Amino acid sequence: MEKLEACFEALEDPRTGNASLHSLLEILVIALCTVLCGGQTAVDMEIFGVAKKDFLNDFLELEHGVPSHDTFSRVFQRIDPKQFQACFMIFMKHFAEACKGVIAIDGKVLRHSFDTASGKSPLHMVSAWGCEQKLVLAQIATDEKSNEITAIPKLLKLLTLKDTIVTVDALNCQRNIAQQIKDQGGNYVFALKGNQGTLHEDVSVFLDDPEISCISNKTTDGDHGRIETRVSTVSTDIDWLQKHHNWPGLEAIGKVTRIRETLTKTSTETAYYLLSMPLSAKRFGQVVRSHWGIENSLHWVLDVIVNEDQNRTRKDNGPNNFAVLRHMALNIIRKETSKGSMRVKFKRAGWNNDFLTTLLAQI
């Protein structure tokens, strides 16, 4: 409890007067425990609190009993999301080692967080994913996918980027983002498409020329009834490119060609990249592939196991704060190293008080 209290001590209680009947810290702890056990809503939090009251009494006072679902809902609607985000960063400092390796940045829409009555669009949460740690390192919310470009610089300021490689999709391949990453001591591998004028065309024509000497690496995997061959190519011959484009920190360019073979068809896809350091072709291929960890290990888990897209929390700051709470729970679950899938561990936490205690003790 001391460590949890330290995480949330700077969070201002949004309630006043008689509305502050229940301890804010106890509300937050019950909410976190509920999500760790697979709960999703304020109603789930009340049901969990009543069902697990004896367990909760071991470390919470619950002087006025278990809060109602309306209390949970109002608190998360009114908590300042910037303050709650700051609590998450303190939580991560207590909880995980410093950033290292590849940091993948991408956004995800919370599809049912829209509010038609008020004209509020679905919340778009942009997250920084530690590919080696398999943890959410930080997140920031925006109302539209197009606003990712302005949200990412704010997200990067929350992170220590020294000795890391930041990866983003083509939408966020922007000069100012590249410069900021370099200024913060990091490096980047950016997917490149046609949103950068003639840069994409120049890179693709150069790397696709069979007479150009480049370093390549080939890997082949087979799974789920398909064989995938990936050829990674890197070139540091970019002086000509920089004369025309002067891209911040650019040291190399690369491409990855993916050939997928199934019983019925074969498909080929080629993607191009900007690199701020001259990686080997093998390491470049690993970095590009690790970026997809944010889709497979974060977004997929949130959708399929945590059912985030079905969550109908819509009012005020509720969608933002609940999203941060889910990220906290996912990090705690991932930090636990016993055997079992994410789905199994969520169930174990709900069924086994000792396992839930083990999860909380990691903080």
Image (cartoon, rainbow, N blue to C red):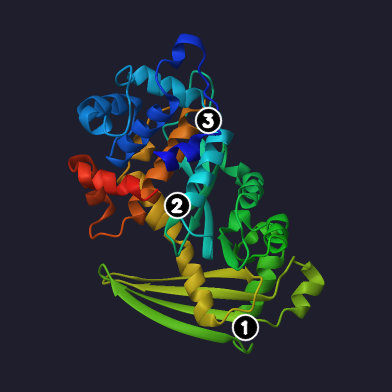
Disc 2 to disc 3, C-alpha distance: 33 Å
Disc on res. 95: 2
- Kindly indicate the quadrant of the structure image that contains residue 268: bottom left
Left or right, 9 with respect to 161, comes to left
**Residue at the spot 23% in from the left edge and 60% down from the top edge:** 339
Say whether marks 2 and 3 touch (CB < 8 Å).
no
Position of residue 328 measured from the top left corner of the image (x, y, whole percent): 42, 44
Q: Is residue 315 visible?
A: no
Left or right, 141 with respect to 70, comes to right
Say whether marks 1 and 3 touch (CB < 8 Å).
no
What amino acid is at disc 3?
Ser
Disc 2 to disc 1, C-alpha distance: 48 Å
Secondary structure category for the residue under label 3: loop
Disc on res. 209: 1
Say whether marks 2 and 1 touch (CB < 8 Å).
no
Nearer mark to the viewer, of 1 and 3: 3
Circle 3 Cα neighbour tier, 10 Å, few/some/many (<14 / 14–19 / ≥20): some
Above/below status of 164 relative to 22: below
Q: Between disc 2 and disc 3, whose residue precedes? A: 2
Disc 3 marks which residue?
121
Q: Is residue 136 visible?
A: yes
What amino acid is at disc 1?
Asp
Judged from this view, the residue extending furthest toward the left is 351
Q: Between disc 2 and disc 1, whose residue precedes? A: 2
What amino acid is at disc 2?
Phe
**Residue at the spot 45% in from the left edge and 36% down from the top edge:** 5
Disc 1 to disc 3, C-alpha distance: 45 Å
Position of residue 71 measured from the top left corner of the image (x, y, whole percent): 39, 19
Position of residue 197 measured from the top left corner of the image (x, y, whole percent): 72, 60
